């Protein structure tokens, strides 16, 4: 993926160079019409919101490209167009917040739960946007399990006791009055693809998996169904957020404003054209399937994963609810002040500039 990003950056620079050469050639002409045309082209090229990011380098920790993350990669393209340098860092065995604290990165596009855990452990992460504003997880069951009430007595696959999927599953169970520690049997299976495979193999009854893995599973069997779409059960809980350490944002306010503006612009771009979204994904993701990207796009648009209103992109209320749920499930030992880890002012400023509008 990093190589693909490099190719796009090279292509963009070549196009800029060719455009500059064309302007020089045009300027050598004597025609008033040519001069007026050049002025019109110059005005058109400056249309739309942007933030001057000259001299700013982002070192985001990278995740494997997926259809849900298409707006993120488009946002990175925008940051480069606005003058920033993007130097991705591939993480192996450490969370994004640890890479931030260690100084390996300065931007983490990662799970909202990771932000909260980092803050609870004494770090200073601050979210300024959200790359996926709704939960992409779905609770899936096989057989005749069609409602939350049917989950009592079932075997539920999870990534691990502290996994975010387990947290969300427990939240659903408790909301329905089912005791997660006595009324169901949790078993550790692995990541979302592993849990989907376990459902297909009928070794578990239920699992909370990513929606992309659900579409893959649904293409292989008719014996499984979505019981709960977490985007509707916990509608304000952001799935993934853009965060950096507070010191970085304080020292580089334009960097935060740039992320917020690119976030809004990318979400607007995603909403506007389904086929363009699919084509971008096919270019970005090795071995991608157009139908699969289209199905995920339809799901994302239906549940509102890519909003353009600042209060919907990053909900302080939603982060508060997520934090409280994590306290209840023991993922963090005590509450944190959510106001210190969420800063929506950059999104609001960006929207005022016209970003995403």
Image: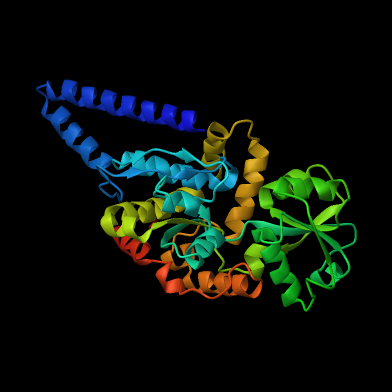
Left or right of 199 in this view: 166: left
Work out which quarter of the rendered image holds the C terminus and state it: bottom left
Identify the residue at image location x=61%, y=70%. 326
Residue situated in front as seen by the camera: 149 or 290: 149
**Image vertical order of residue 317 relative to residue 229, above or below:** below
Pinpoint residue 277: horizontal percent, then vertical percent: 53, 42
The answer to whether residue 354 of the structure is visible from this angle is no
Q: Residue at x 62, y 51 (%)?
A: 298
On screen, residue 17 versus residue 9, left or right, reads left
Nearer to us in this view, 99 or 137? 99
Question: Picture coordinates of residue 251 (x, y %)?
Answer: 27, 56
Depth order, front residue of 46/74: 74
Q: Is residue 91 left or right of residue 186?
A: left
Quadrant location of residue 309?
Answer: bottom left
Q: Is residue 218 above or below residue 333?
A: above
Q: Is residue 181 visible?
A: yes
Q: Residue at x 70, y 49 (%)?
A: 191
Residue 159: x %, y % from top left: 71, 54
Residue 43, quarter of the rendered image: top left
Q: Residue at x 54, y 43 (%)?
A: 63
Count of marks overlaid on the render:
0
């Amino acid at each position: 993926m990093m190589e693909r990003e490099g190719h796009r950056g090279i292509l963009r620079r070549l196009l800029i160079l060719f455009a500059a050469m064309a302007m020089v050639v045009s300027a050598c002409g004597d025609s008033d019409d040519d001069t007026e045309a050049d002025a019109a082209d110059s005005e058109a090229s400056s249309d739309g919101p942007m933030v001057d990011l000259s001299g700013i380098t982002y070192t985001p920790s990278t995740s494997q490209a997926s259809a849900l993350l298409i707006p993120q990669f488009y946002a990175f393209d925008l940051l480069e167009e606005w003058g920033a340098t993007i130097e991705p860092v591939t993480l192996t065995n450490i969370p994004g917040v640890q890479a931030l604290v260690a100084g390996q990165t300065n931007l983490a596009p990662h799970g909202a739960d990771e932000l909260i855990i980092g803050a609870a452990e004494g770090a200073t992460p601050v979210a300024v946007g959200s790359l996926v504003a709704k939960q992409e997880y779905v609770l899936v069951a096989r057989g005749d399990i069609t409602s939350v009430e049917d989950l009592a007595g079932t075997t539920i696959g999870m990534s691990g006791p502290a996994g975010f999927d387990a947290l969300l599953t427990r939240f659903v169970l408790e909301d329905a009055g089912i005791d997660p520690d006595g009324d169901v049997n949790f078993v550790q299976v692995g990541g979302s693809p592993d849990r989907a495979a376990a459902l297909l193999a009928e070794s578990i009854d239920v699992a909370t998996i990513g929606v992309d893995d659900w579409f893959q599973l649904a293409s292989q069997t008719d014996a499984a169904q979505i019981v709960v779409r977490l985007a509707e059960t916990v509608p304000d809980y952001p799935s993934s957020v853009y965060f950096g350490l507070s010191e970085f944002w304080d020292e580089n306010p334009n960097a935060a404003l740039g992320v917020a503006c690119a976030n809004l612009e990318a979400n607007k771009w995603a909403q506007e054209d389904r086929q363009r979204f699919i084509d971008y994904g096919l270019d970005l993701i090795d071995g991608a399937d157009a139908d699969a990207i289209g199905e995920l796009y339809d799901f994302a648009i239906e549940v509102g994963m890519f909003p353009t209103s600042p209060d919907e992109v990053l909900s302080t209320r939603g982060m508060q609810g997520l934090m409280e749920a994590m306290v209840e499930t023991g993922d963090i030992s005590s509450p944190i002040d959510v106001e210190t880890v969420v800063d929506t002012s950059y999104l609001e400023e960006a929207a005022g500039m016209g970003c995403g509008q």
